[in-house]
Amino acid sequence: MTAQPVRPERSGPETASVMSVSPFKPPLVRAVFRDVTPMHISRPAAWAAASVTRTVLTEIIDGARKAAAEEGRKKLIPGDLLSAIDRNVELEVGSKWYDHSPTFRGLTGVLYDAKGVIVPLRRRSRSRRPSAVVGAHRFEAGVKKLLLSRGTTAVPAMVRDLDGIASVFLTDLARDAAVVVREGGVKRFGTVTLAMSGEPAPPPSLTDSRRAPSARRGDGRTIGRDDVLAAATIQLFGGDLRQRALTEAREATRSTSAD
């Protein structure tokens, strides 16, 4: 009897290393991308998007853990999330979620219309079409796995916020990846360099030279791994988090084949 080939998504030594990268599985990633664009997403692109999302959520959770530890707690609460973001501006991602979460309600400011009337907070859409906010519950299982992998748990409100941030972040990542494909590369990506007044600016770092290229290769109907990495450079504006996210995504996709 001839042995059947093993599907790479489910088993095998190469996939085992990739599966350990993210609790957000490719089917979920593909579902989010389909909400945003009709373009096909390659297997490496799905793994890259999952890996980047995992890296971002891990950094947020670790920051919240430190805040909780300072108060002698192991279970995370929404206040720990605020502390983590306050201490590290790189963690301020998925900001569209902030308008929908009680955790951030007092921080997003009061909006006024042209007549000076306060604009009420947006309510959840009842549209049948999924959105980053309505579909946030899809991330609950992955968020809980990620929390456990970091040796912690969280109250339901904190899990909800992590769900929402992950959903909005991945949705924005998908949208920017589609833009990269349509425009043929990154059109709105730059670098900010800090220097003392009167002193010459330092030369670009080695990490800057390894960033996503300005032009892409491939057809205009498929989102590839490099398109997702380019989108990550747009979503993550700089610093260690972006570099780590790109490095881990490349490692996660090293053994995958394009489809």
Image (spheres, rainbow, N blue to C red):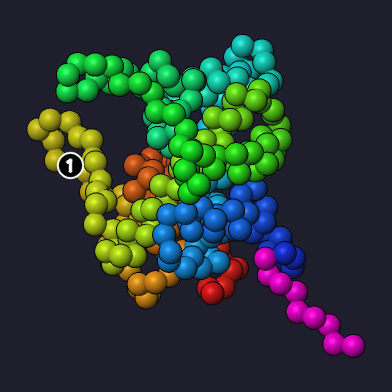
199 displayed left or right of 56: left
Q: Residues within 10 Å of mark 1 (few under 14, many from 20)?
A: few
Residue at the extreme left of the image, as rendered: 198
Residue at the extreme bottom of the image, as rendered: 1
Viewer-nearest residue: 38 or 165: 38
Q: Quadrant of residue 236?
A: top left
> Going 26% across and 51% down the picture, which residue do you hit?
189
Viewer-nearest residue: 192 or 23: 23
Give x and y (percent) for residue 25.
63, 54
Viewer-nearest residue: 101 or 210: 101
Residue at the extreme top of the image, as rendered: 71
153 displayed left or right of 45: right
Q: Is residue 219 visible?
A: yes
> Going 32% across and 58% down the picture, which residue do you hit?
179
- The mark total stands at 1
Name the residue type under label 1. Answer: Ala
Q: Which residue is mark 1?
A: 201
Quadrant location of the C terminus?
bottom right
Please provide the residue range marked out in magenta. 1-9
Q: Quadrant of residue 36?
A: bottom left
Is residue 155 located in the magenta-colored stretch of the structure? no
Quadrant location of the N terminus?
bottom right
Give x and y (percent) for residue 231.
38, 53
Q: Is residue 150 visible?
A: no
